[in-house]
Image (spheres, grey):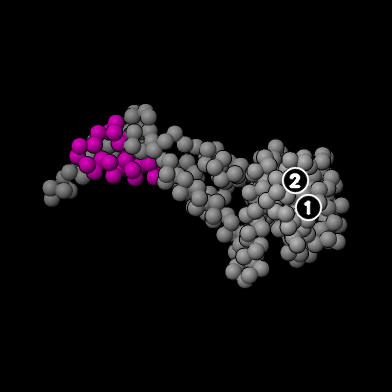
Amino acid sequence: MHELIIADSGSRVPDDLLSVIRQVHQELMITSLTVCGRELLDVICRKRPDLVVVDLLLSGMNGLDVIRQTREMELQTHFIVVSAQVRFEDIRTAVQLGVDDFLFKPLKPLELQNSVSRVLQKMEADSKGQTSSAPGRRDLECGYVERTKRWIEKHYAEPVSLKAAASEIYLHPTYLGFLFKKEVGVSFTEYLTQRRIEAAKQCLSDPGCTAAQAAKLSGYRDVKYFCKVFRKKTGLSPVSFQKQKREKMIQ
């Protein structure tokens, strides 16, 4: 039986959060604690839980310090970090420490349940020798990014945003944006723009496609703005791009 500890610094974990996890994972032994960082580290050392959902802002020793010392002791504990604040430095440190997920308060029951389920599935794969612990964390991150790319492919012609994509994947936009840039090398917005421009170029390859049609099909509602972005990314206006295509076809 796997053991899950949910540790908060100042308030009892709401019953609805616990109940939704118990409904899906009846095999889990769940303990909810209101502790400081040092107390949580002592509990981890004694009980060796499989998974800990830890508040970043624990008193005395914060959540990241608890994770860091757990890693130094080489305990095979998985972590889901929870925070009420959005700080790039904390997200970067959490990723470097190999946390399995990063959620933001106020927690939503389904969001937490999905996160716990993903980590348990990865743990099960680890136990069967399908992957090691470190690649498993990377697989999880890559999975988020791949799901985001597929979402962009499906919705790029619509008014979309990082916030909308993150909502579909049950991640905070800041965390998803960080992972996306880390894995892909460009930001979510830049990747979306590239995909839209590729769609516009495909449309403009047809001599009958107008700039207005290309803008609409690639997700831009303002034709002037579309033309500005297109020129910036290709070095040509939509009309010049289309003319160049025609000339190459004639040659």
Q: Is mark 1 on a helix, strand or loop?
A: strand
Q: Is mark 2 on a helix, strand or loop?
A: helix
Q: Which residue is drawn at 65% across and 64% down?
A: 124
Q: Position of residue 106 (x, y in %)?
A: 70, 37
**Distance of mark 2 from mark 1, alpha carbons?**
8 Å
Q: Which residue is drawn at 74% across and 60% down?
A: 2
Q: Do the residues labelled 2 and 1 touch (CB within 8 Å)?
A: yes
Which residue bears the numbered disc 2?
18
- Residue 167: image quadrant is top right
Q: Position of residue 123 (x, y in %)?
A: 66, 62
Q: Is residue 154 or residue 71 the one in the foreground?
A: 154
Q: Work out whether residue 240 can be spotted.
A: no
Q: Is residue 7 above or below residue 230?
A: below
Q: Does the magenta stretch include residue 85?
A: no
- Residue 71: image quadrant is bottom right
Which residue bears the numbered disc 1?
30
Q: Is residue 62 above or below residue 230?
A: below
Q: What stretch is highlighted in magenta?
A: 193-215
Q: In this view, does 141 lie above or below 214?
A: below
Q: Position of residue 196 (x, y in %)?
A: 38, 41
**Quarter holding the N terminus?**
bottom right
Magenta portion: prevailing SS class = helix
